[in-house]
Image (cartoon, coloured by chain):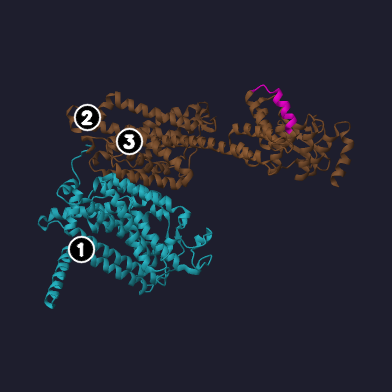
Amino acid sequence: MLLVFAVALLAPICGARGEPYANAVAHFTGDSFSETEQGIAGVAASGNGLAATVITALQEGRLLFSAQERLVLIREAAGRLLDALTGEAFAGMPPADLSTVRLNNRLRRIVEGVLGTLTLLSPDPARRMDAAQAVFRSHDPNALALLDQAIAKEADPRIKTVLVEARAAVVLYLDSVEDAEKIAAVAVIRDRADQDALALLGGLPPTTSPAVMKAAADAITSIQNGLAIWTALQNAWYGLSLGSVLLLAAIGLAITFGVMGVINMAHGEMVMLGAYTTYVVQQLIRAYNPGWFDYSLAIALPLAFLVAGAIGILIERGIIHFLYGRPLETLLATWGLSLILQQAVRTVFGPTNKDVTAPSWMSGSFEVGQLTITYNRLCIIVFTLLIFAGLLALLRWSRFGLEMRAVTQNRTMAASMGIRTSRIDALTFGLGSGIAGLAGVALSQIDNVSPNLGQGYIIDSFMVVVFGGVGNLWGTLVGAFTLGIANKFLEPYAGAVLSKIAILVLIILFIQKRPRGLFALKGRAAEA
Amino acid sequence: MSHVEFSSYFRRRSEKAYAIASRALDRGALAFLALLAAVGVLVPLLNLAVPPTSPLHVSTYFVVLLGKYLCFALLALAIDLIWGYGGILSLGHGAFFALGGYAMGMYLMRQIGTRGVYAHPVLPDFMVFLNWSELPVYWHGFEYFAYAAVMILFVPGLLAFVFGWFAFRSRVSGVYFSIITQALTFALMLGFFRNNLGFGGNNGLTDFKDILGFNVQAPGTRAGLFAASMLALMLGFVVCRIVVSSKFGSVLIAIRDAEARVRFLGYRVEAYKLFVFTLSACMAGVAGALFVPQVGIINPSEFSPANSIEAVIWVAVGGRGTLTGAVLGALLVNYAKTTFTSGVLAPYWLFLLGGLFVAVTLLLPRGIVGTVQDLWLRLHPSSGPREIAPVPDEAPRPAE
């Protein structure tokens, strides 16, 4: 009733323009979801040149209406108002009751599908791609003719593939198509092999013939097998990522605990100090020279190394130095230190999480097949491996590394060769702490920077070192990645918490079998 | 067996018992026990029998506070037994404490009955809330105090036995042992945080009403719990004294000072360690069980590694290898904690606690009681050692 009334009122305004389009646009003044739905369908079917503009505006909340003046307007990004009927600038005063045409989730899906169909022929390749994907998901039967047209015209092979897939999707859901064509369509969709394809094949209408159903079921199995491989790869990637974080946190520990036999419970706090150094550097850059922001991490790295390393040397000279040969006391004293450091940071910076932002070149992601790889995770993996390689090189080729190994293997002999063992101890401890500081810079990108940052890593890092074998950097590497990957592969079955518990229990059992870890030192050095 | 044989058998037995007792309870130990007993009688008496207006009155708040400290003191004794005498540093003793606490908490939960928020006759509130339809198997039996009491000893003891059997058999010792015990309590904490384990998730067990038919909030019950804690502490002290003054104790101390040598002498080192570790876990379980009705809640944060390591520092402050020191340290540090954390000094408590760790290990390696004993021995060289405290290695020898 209302509709007839509205149309009757609108008719004289629209004049000579396409009647169906004007009638459809008039539905948008109805201010109800069912009216809007009719409007969308009408606009889409009208074939009017403005259809895509109107529907896009609707999707983006820029389609306005006035119920009193029977007006439908489009607000452009610049703020200018256009008349939806003519596409020309709206001259008069905006009506007082102008408001946005509302959408709900169901309508939003319809809009997406319709928009896909409408923009299939858009000159912009990115929009054509989006449109093809949208049609694939909506499998709107009205799009078939347009799809054929688009496939014929399309030059970009990637878009063409998606268009063909979209056509196959539409065909599958049409009742009037031969089985043979549908089975061919199933094959096309099977090759797409992703979650959308699964959803499409799983949702076939019950009227579909058994032969097609069987083909679809086969395709689903094959897609799922393919996806399982991708899931495994995904888990492996997450595992590598977690492993690199563990390695980063544990590698400094591997030096202080592994090489020197010193239990440093304050190791996690060195990581935290590194993260806070990054925070301070970023704050200073923001305040004085915002242009350098992209280099903030590069500036923070050496500073974090120096800060954590210097504090490490202080700790070694001031406390640990007096406790050599008493590992349990060292453990307690460094635990006390960790409490002091945490509370000091809490006093200075406050207990809340600090905001450390990723520089622009570290944000974003890219896709390999079905894998999404974020740049910050990738950076951390590369960074960890670089540090590891650097450390190995330092131990292998530098004078300091040589002296360090000598002291580890036989302290007395090293001392009689003229190596100042006590100085080497301090430097080694500083090196381990400094590397923890570097880890802090990296971890500030993926974890909350708070006084408790280090606490979360200390048990895990000890597990890595103990699992990998004390006194062996390669053991730490293998240990970290094994634990990381094992954790991520257990997670889908057991949940995050249970898999963590399982890993801890496995390590405890593992230590039964090999009390000295995976790569145990042999010979005299092992009898510490 | 004739009458004469029978009585002589008993005489032999009682002579043996007397010998053990007189060796275990020397003058110092008896004096300490008498002091504990006096406090155990006086505090409840001054709380209940003396009117609140009197200057001699002890407030219920203080009774509860001191009762809590006594539970901590028992935990400290348990840690001292393995660390001070056996050289085993467990950073997961809070786990046994919490397990004992959970066993007691389960009994107290079952006593609530229909007085819970949902008034379910069998299921505790949190289970009704989670839409559970029946009681999990492991909750059965906890309505009986006797069963709960057995579990308080059995559950921590069993865990310690299994864990210790694995660990000591493969000669995991020193810092490795410390770290995996820390991982153990961490894993348990993560586990108990889960709702579907059936222990109330992160809220834990709380809202207790009755213990053995007495209201847990009533001053009389609180005084009773205080007396029970004191009794448990005294009992724990006597047990520890018997262990450390026996031949077993001498072997234990030998293991602490030179494990390899004791093994080469033919002793089964792992059996000694396993026994003392299990005994210590049972003591920690009792401490936890007495702790829960006094504070009125048990939740997974009791498993947090920081709690366990804090308990170690009580022993270090008081003096490890001296049982009186463990008790004294627990009381002193916790008193300091209460004083600091409840006033304007709260932000500085962690500085103090952290400083305590550093200062005690560097400057006071034998703790308060150990240092006092040393001074006493220096002034009276003839009196001989009363308790054998560990001598820290003087020569620094890292990683050899």
Task: State which chain disc 1 sits on.
Answer: B
From the viewer's perspective, is B204 left or right of B249? right
A445 lies left or right of A108: left
For the point 25% across and 52% down, which residue is it?
B83
| Numbered disc 2: secondary structure | loop
In the image, which lettered chain appears brown?
Answer: A
Q: CA distance from mark 1 to mark 3?
A: 45 Å
Q: Main secondary structure of the magenta part?
A: helix
Quarter location, residue A57: top right
Q: Earlier in the sequence, mark 3 or mark 2?
A: 3
Of all residues shown, which one is farthest toward the top?
A155
> Real-space Cα distance between discs 1 and 2?
49 Å
Proximity of marks 3 and 2: CB atoms separated by less than 8 Å = no
Which color was chain B given? cyan
Mark 3, residues whose alpha carbon is within 10 Å: few (<14), some, or many (≥20)? Answer: many
Confirm whether the magenta stretch covers residue A154: yes
In magenta, the rendered stretch is A143-156
Kind of residue sitting beneath label 3: Ala
Residue A161 seen in this snapshot = yes
Q: Amino acid at mark 2?
A: Arg
How packed is label 2: few (under 14 Cα within 10 Å), some, or many (20 or more)? some
**Who's the residue at 40% across and 34% down the image?**
A439
Chain label for disc 3 = A
Which secondary structure lies at badge 3? helix
Q: Using the image, name the chain to which the residue with label 2 belongs.
A: A
Q: Which residue matches tag 3?
A: A254
Q: Which mark is residue B29?
A: 1
Q: Nearer the viewer, mark 1 or mark 3?
A: 3
**Which quadrant does the C terminus of chain A fall into?**
top left
Of residue A221 and residue B173, the one placed in the foreground of this image is: A221
